[in-house]
Image (cartoon, rainbow, N blue to C red):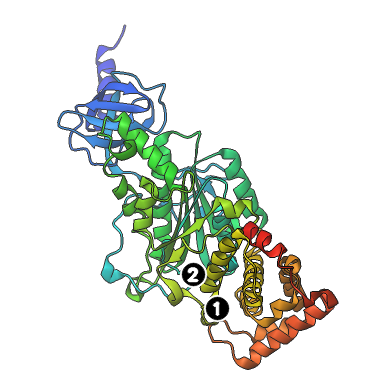
């Protein structure tokens, strides 16, 4: 016989043990899905840049907020999300995980590891969009960020907290300068962040391999969004990298961040905007494309001591077409940044590496972020190079040369050779001071033009081995004394005598100089 009362008591006991749970979430329904874009109806109180959850475990970013519809772009699941699927509001904007645990790692713009290593354990997050520091919170940019590249540190100095644009055509060495700068921050107490935007996976792998082999990943984080990634991730990458940089800056640390490159970032934003049916403007870019980069680069700053004294130095990269720096995106970014390093294809192809065009390159911070000794001896360098290049162009007409003009051309050519520098061969500040002092002295007249590049590298090796104490005597933060200059010149002449020999008395003939000048100018 079944005891009905016992069964009833058992059911009531189980019902009493069930905890009441309600999950109230704002929900909408997808009314369009295509090309990575979804239109959602029924969502209320959604914020711009809010993270949305889509049925099936996918995520999207809300960008268009209309009266009866929300336009969003998918981070994943482009071919899985369908008409009629549910979309949920999270109430949170996109955040990036931050912390010291990020150093040495390769992550996507959402903070997920891509290097196959252990999961990143951090409970610290920052919003990817954050207001730039106020003017009253900023301090003067006066501390140099050494790149280790002679042509840049001597003529286009970069300060900690500055925004210096690297601009030029494809394959002119833009990324090489950025990577060299990261490598040069070893033992400089600077944290580096490299943001890849739309780059090839193979190119990024080479860069990471270079950083690892040099030990630079110990103080570097790579935020990766390659050309294979969805466009929204490419759009988000620089903001995620900047959020990570801000975490360290507000802790009082100095940070270097490289955006490689903002041309592809603008293209990614244009792609999303056109798919969201926003009006197209000049060159099909939306009207707010200037704000796209200004709100990113304005977050680079040098904070005052009350705010911790940290800094973010930004090196955005922009690619030009046929050297046209007057195009839409280049002019936008030039007007936002504090100067630009312009790399020229003609110089690159003629063997001048780095191919810096001194006439079009500028640093608006200038000598205030330069070591005193370098500022002292590089003051006339830009003028001397400009005179040389003007003469080199004029000599293409084949005029006869007087002795003084021959001397100016020869010295200009030798200075150009001195500024040539192989990739990954970074100079210390003291080595730069020696090279600048010697290359602008009368000693260069004793060196044959074709041997100048070899002489530069050989001189530094000679000093490291035989006169290491000379480098220790140099204080980069103080001007060189006449006595110290004489010591440098004596060592340089000693090396000339033992390396160049008696052949060094003359320079190239007048007939050879126009061709050499044309090649290097």
Q: In the picture shown, does residue 268 fall above or below 464?
A: above
x, y (%) of residue 476? 57, 81
Tell me: residue 389, above or below residue 96.
below
Which image quarter: residue 517? bottom right
- Residue 374's mark? 1
Residue 303 image point, x, y percent: 36, 69
Figure quadrant of the C terminus: bottom right
Name the N-terminal-most of marks 2 and 1.
2
Q: Could you tell me which quadrant the N terminus lies in?
A: top left
**Relative image position of residue 202 (x, y in whole percent):** 60, 39
Residue 418 visible (yes or no): yes
Q: Is residue 153 visible?
A: no
Furthest toward the front, the residue is: 400
What residue is drawn where x is 66% and y is 72%? 406
Q: Give the number of the disc on residue 169.
A: none
Q: Name the disc covering residue 157, or none.
A: 2
Asked whether, in this view, residue 520 is left or right of residue 265, the answer is right
Image quarter of residue 506: bottom right
Q: Compute the Cα span from label 2 to label 1.
A: 10 Å
Residue under the point 29% across and 70% down:
137
Q: Residue at x 55, y 73 (%)?
A: 384
Kindly give the residue lying farthest to the left in the view shown. Answer: 67
Q: Which of 403 and 247 is in front in this view?
A: 403
| Residue 486 drawn at (x, y percent) | 68, 89
Q: In this view, does 46 lie above or below 139?
A: above
Mark 2 lies on a secondary structure that is loop
Return the residue nearer the eye: 156 or 493. 493
Q: Are marks 2 and 1 in contact (CB under 8 Å)?
A: yes
**Element type where label 1 sits in the image:** helix
Q: Does 46 sit left or right of 233 as displayed?
A: left
User: Residue drawn 32% across and 75% down?
Assistant: 306
């Amino acid at each position: 016989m079944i005891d009905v009362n016992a069964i009833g008591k058992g059911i009531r006991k189980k019902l009493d043990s069930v905890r009441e749970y309600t999950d109230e979430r704002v929900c909408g329904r997808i009314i369009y899905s295509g090309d990575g874009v979804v239109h959602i109806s029924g969502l209320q109180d959604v914020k711009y840049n809010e993270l949305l959850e889509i049925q099936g475990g996918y995520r999207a970013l809300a960008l268009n907020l209309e009266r009866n519809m929300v336009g969003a772009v998918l981070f994943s699941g482009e071919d899985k999300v369908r008409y009629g699927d549910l979309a949920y509001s999270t109430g949170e904007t996109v955040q990036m995980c931050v912390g010291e645990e990020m150093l040495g790692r390769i992550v996507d713009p959402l903070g997920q590891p891509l290097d196959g290593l252990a999961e990143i354990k951090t409970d610290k997050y920052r919003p990817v969009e954050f207001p730039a520091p106020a003017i009253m919170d900023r301090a003067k940019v006066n501390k140099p960020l050494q790149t280790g590249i002679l042509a840049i540190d001597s003529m286009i100095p970069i300060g900690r907290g500055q925004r210096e644009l690297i601009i030029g055509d494809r394959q002119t060495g833009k990324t090489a300068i950025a990577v060299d700068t990261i490598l040069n921050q070893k033992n400089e107490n600077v944290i580096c962040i490299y943001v890849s935007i739309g780059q090839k996976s193979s190119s990024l792998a080479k860069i990471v391999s270079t950083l690892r082999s040099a030990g630079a990943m110990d103080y570097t984080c790579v935020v990766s969004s390659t050309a294979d990634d969805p466009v929204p991730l490419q759009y988000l990458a620089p903001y995620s990298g900047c959020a990570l940089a801000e975490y360290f800056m507000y802790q009082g640390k100095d940070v270097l961040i490289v955006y490689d490159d903002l041309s592809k970032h603008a293209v990614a934003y244009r792609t999303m905007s056109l798919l969201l049916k926003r009006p197209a403007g000049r060159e099909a870019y939306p009207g707010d494309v200037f704000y796209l980069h200004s709100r990113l680069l304005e977050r680079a700053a040098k904070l005052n001591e009350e705010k911790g004294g940290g800094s973010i130095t930004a090196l955005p990269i922009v690619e030009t077409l046929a050297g046209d720096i007057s195009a839409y995106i280049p002019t936008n970014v030039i007007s936002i940044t504090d100067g630009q390093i312009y790399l020229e294809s003609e110089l690159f192809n003629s063997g001048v590496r780095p191919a810096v065009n001194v006439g079009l390159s500028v640093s608006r911070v200038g000598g205030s972020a330069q070591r005193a000794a370098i500022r002292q001896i590089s003051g006339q360098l830009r003028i001397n190079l400009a005179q040389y290049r003007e003469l080199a162009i004029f000599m293409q007409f084949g005029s006869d040369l007087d002795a003084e003009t021959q001397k100016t051309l020869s010295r200009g050519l030798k200075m150009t050779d001195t500024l040539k520098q192989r990739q990954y061969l970074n100079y210390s500040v003291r080595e730069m001071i020696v090279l600048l002092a010697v290359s602008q002295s009368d000693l260069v007249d004793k060196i044959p033009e074709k041997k100048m590049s070899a002489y530069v590298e050989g001189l530094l090796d000679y000093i490291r081995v035989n006169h290491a104490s000379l480098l220790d005597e140099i204080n980069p933060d103080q001007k060189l004394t006449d006595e110290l200059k004489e010591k440098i010149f004596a060592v340089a002449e000693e090396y000339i005598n033992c390396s160049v020999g008696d052949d060094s008395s003359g320079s190239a003939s007048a007939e050879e100089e126009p061709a050499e000048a044309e090649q290097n100018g």
